[in-house]
Amino acid sequence: MTLAVTSSSPQAFSMEFPLWGVSAHVTVRLRGRNADPMLAAETLTAVRHWLVEAEARFSAARPDSEVAQLQRGQLASAERSPELRELVDAVSWLQRDTGGAFRPWNPDGVYDASGYIKGWSIQRAIRLLQQRGIRDAAIGVGDDIAVVGSASEDSPWELTVAYRGTNGEGRAGAGSSSTPERAALVLTPGCRHTGMAVAVSGDHARGDHIWLPAQGPQGTPGRPASLVVVVGEDAGLADAYATAVWAIAGTQGVPAALEWVEDRPGFGAALLPRSGPMVTTSGLDRYICRPQASPVPSQGAARLSLHGDDGAAPVR
């Protein structure tokens, strides 16, 4: 899965860097007097600093992170940072909201809220940009993306999600030019929204990495979905809800997962079963620019690309 953010606007500036084991891409479009490359560089650097800091502080894979210290019982409530308290409270609420489909404790008893933290850090980065007066921006980390404003004066941000078939193991195969494309969506916040967040979950990239409630690792039964796409206006919730929808589909079936999303105002979802066409919720309609089949690169089973028109100026 790849991410590319571009805009033809001469006021668009971008930065790309490694994060969470994938590629992060930030694009901002400055307007009028604010179209200053120095201001763009300062703004992008501030966003990069926050996103890198969030990974360092809250990744369960880092032994010195606040989450790792929480796992080891080394942080009492009074010693937790405001951001960690916010995370813990949000994840506790998400566990209740999803009926346990999203939970921070894995079966080994390890606290790991990575299914929310990446999207949450992106949403905070969007707020950081808005506090600096930036009205148009796109931030993507792996398969979590958030946008605000527009890509250019006359073009909204568009997000294309395209997916090829799966191999016999149920995991997304490498994909080739001879593999037929199974589904594609083109999403946009449009004129009715000030922003849009998109998150993708499933075993299309990393295989069986999601644990289902009251079961072992995702395995022999309960694998009805190859891919779940959740769209809303908050990147943290979209991230967690995508995981929850995939888990609900695995334990209760695809209809139950779709019904669950229908009860979440402002969110929509698309779910690609192991076989058959993609199914969607009514909430997705407001974000669909045009459903269509888009060319998929020969490498990778899924493509997630975000675009305006062409060519934002890179900032290093």
Image (tube, rainbow, N blue to C red):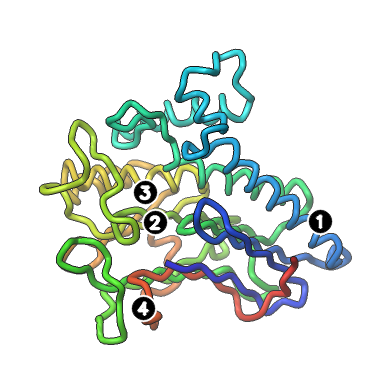
Local secondary structure at mark 4: loop
Q: What's the mark number on residue 42? A: 1
Residue carrying label 3: 242
Tell which tag, 1 or 2, sits nearer the viewer: 1
Would residue 195 appear left or right of 252 to someone viewing this image? right
**Mark 1 vs 2, N-terminal side:** 1
Picture residue at 38% right of the left edge, 62% below the top:
285
Amino acid on which disc 4 is placed? Gln
Q: CA distance from mark 1 to mark 4?
A: 38 Å
Find residue 273 and report its horizontal and vertical position in percent: 20, 61
Are there few (<14), some (14-19), or many (20+) residues within 10 Å of tag 4? few
Give the residue at the far bottom of this rendering: 178
- Taking depth in this image into account, of 72 and 289 the one nearest to the observer is 72
Picture residue at 46% right of the left edge, 67% below the top:
187
**Mark 1 vs 3, N-terminal side:** 1
Query: Is 235 situated above or below 276?
Result: above
Residue carrying label 2: 200
Q: CA distance from mark 1 to mark 3?
A: 33 Å
Tell which tag, 4 or 3, sits nearer the viewer: 3
Residue carrying label 4: 292
Are there few (<14), some (14-19), or many (20+) residues within 10 Å of tag 2? many
Q: Tell me whether circle 3 and circle 2 mark residues in contact (CB < 8 Å).
A: yes
Local secondary structure at mark 2: strand
Q: CA distance from mark 4 to mark 2?
A: 18 Å
